[in-house]
Amino acid sequence: MAINCYRSFAIISLCMALLLMTQCSLQGIGIWRLGLEDPMYWKIIPKKIKVKKVN
């Protein structure tokens, strides 16, 4: 599934982190300064990986 990564360096960085995560079978990524990220993060992440919600 291709995702257009063009909005900003932060979005490109996120896409690269998600790609690395899947290629290296990592269990997750970290997001620096949660709350200040580009709102597109929350649209891109579930398109690229399966998201588990914790209650």
Image (tube, grey):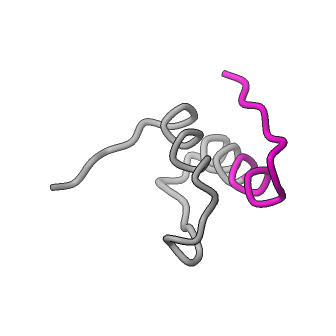
43 and 45: which one is in front? 43
Q: Quadrant of residue 22?
A: top right
Whether residue 9 appears in magenta in the rendering, the answer is: yes
Left or right, residue 54 beside residue 40 = left
Residue visible at 22% across and 54% down?
54
Percent x, y of residue 29: 55, 60
In the rendered image, the vertical position of residue 3 relative to residue 12, given as above or below: above
In the rendered image, the vertical position of residue 33 relative to residue 24, given as above or below: below
In the rendered image, the vertical position of residue 31 relative to residue 24, given as above or below: below
The span picked out in magenta is 1-16
Residue visible at 80% across and 47% down?
7
Whether residue 2 appears in magenta in the rendering, the answer is: yes
Residue visible at 54% across and 43% down?
45
- Judged from this view, the residue extending furthest toward the top is 1
Residue visible at 56% across and 68% down?
31
Quarter of the image containing the N terminus?
A: top right
Percent x, y of residue 4: 78, 32
Percent x, y of residue 53: 27, 48
Quarter of the image containing the C terminus?
A: bottom left
- Judged from this view, the residue extending furthest toward the left is 55
Count of numbered circles on the image: 0
49 and 21: which one is in front? 49
39 and 27: which one is in front? 39
Q: Quadrant of residue 30?
A: bottom right
44 and 36: which one is in front? 36
